[in-house]
Image: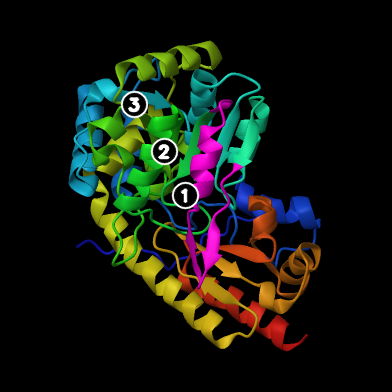
Amino acid sequence: MAVYDFDTLVDRRHTSSEKWHLIEQDMGPGNDDVIALSVADMEFKPAPEIVDALVEAAKTDIFGYDYATDGYFDALVGWMERRHGLAVDPAWVSLSDGVMPAVNTALRAVTHPGDKVIIQRPVYYPFMRAAENNGLTILDNALTLADGRYTIDFDDLAAKARDPRCTAMLLCNPHNPVGRVWTPEELRRIGDICIREGVALLVDEIHADFAYPGHQVTLFSTLGERYARHCIEFTAPTKTFNLAGLLCSNVIIPDPELKERFDVAAENIAGLTVSHFGLVACQAAYEHAGPWLDALMEVLEANLALVRDFAARTEGIELIEPEGTYLAWLDCRGLGMDADALREFMRGKARVYLDEGILFGQSGAGFERVNLACPTALLRRALDQIGAAIAAR
Ligand SMILES: Cc1ncc(COP(=O)(O)O)c(C=O)c1O
């Protein structure tokens, strides 16, 4: 296996990196010592195989209007088959410049303003904005936390789905931020409820390539035709290979009528566009960068082990063990601080900028989301700083 560099820290302060810019934006100048472990991109350079393809394209290509070639679809189909056992028919695929643009488009396609949409808080906060911006009322099928693990309240889900104004559910699989990899049984139960009640199922699978040992992500459409025909699946190489800035995602819609509705909605908004470099990077990633991802998973497992040890020896902090994603959800309620105090403590005292749990909904108050996708030395430093700040309280 090629040796990849997951140790070098690339200094992204004062670059166009949103994650590092947020420190100055929220805390003001003079805070360059604060470590950012927030926004879900990685502190790692992309796989050299992807960089090579981009450089080659920059040198040789003409940047006119593009379409996705057979080579692009072969790469996508091959990845989904090898990694997820999903036989994608290219006719099911619509391209988009991002999962959230596609989620917004899908909401326009399957709901009307005034409808209701189910989400499961605490959840990736742009889901809430997408619902609200599209004139939808949120029905929160709140996740249940017991014994350090989140599960779904299916009775509550069935009751909410029964609401005649409820027309869509936004499902996050694996779930950001709580890290659950939903089991086939859980997914089937969700699917059965949504099919029975005529609730369109929008499944965000952007984190699907990250599962820890003992867990296997099930792509919703692999459950069988009945389920596949009822869903819109959002996938992307951007989270997997750290390419968010290149804007590329593949929306999988096995039902032709549903796909037509999505495509028309997309055309009415911004079109089905992907950048030239997004196409090049996605194809190269799916063709050649599998070994990079496998090597990355080992680093993520080591980083997760660090956080696990840290939580085990730190009073007031519990790790909600992630089954997938590169995000760790820390239950900090034992520190006895409200959301404002916890934010101030992490940023002001520990000098670490995390995604505060309350962003993901009120049920996230007292939690912090830690991005594990960084050199181990940086994560160790951040955890040491949090530990020292707690000891000094
Ligand atoms: C669950 C989830 N969906 C979507 C996105 C964003 O995807 P995109 O950048 O393709 O819009 C993220 C990014 O963190 C995410 O965690």
Residue 255: name its quadrant: top left
**Residue at horizontal 19%, vertical 63%?**
1
Residue 287: name its quadrant: top left
- Left/right placement of residue 41 relative to residue 58 reads right
**Residue at horizontal 75%, vertical 68%?**
342
Ligand 1 is within 8 Å of the C-beta of the residue at disc 3: no
Residue 193 circle label: 2
Q: What stretch is highlighted in magenta?
A: 140-166
Q: Nearer the viewer, mark 3 or mark 2?
A: 2
Ligand 1 is within 8 Å of the C-beta of the residue at disc 2: no
Location of residue 224 in the rendering, given as x and y in whole percent from the top left corner: 23, 37
**Residue holding disc 1:** 154
Is 300 magenta? The answer is no
Is 149 magenta? The answer is yes
Q: Can residue 23 be seen in this view?
A: yes
Along the line of sight, which residue is nearer the eye, 317 or 158?
158
Location of residue 147 in the rendering, given as x and y in whole percent from the top left corner: 50, 73
**Residue holding disc 3:** 253
Label 2 vs label 1: CA separation?
9 Å
The way the protein has been coloured in the rendering is rainbow
Residue 351 circle label: none
- Left/right placement of residue 133 relative to residue 318 reads right
Location of residue 232 in the rendering, given as x and y in whole percent from the top left corner: 39, 30
Label 3 vs label 2: CA separation?
19 Å
Q: Which of marks 3 and 2 is nearer the N terminus?
A: 2
Q: Earlier in the sequence, mark 2 or mark 1?
A: 1
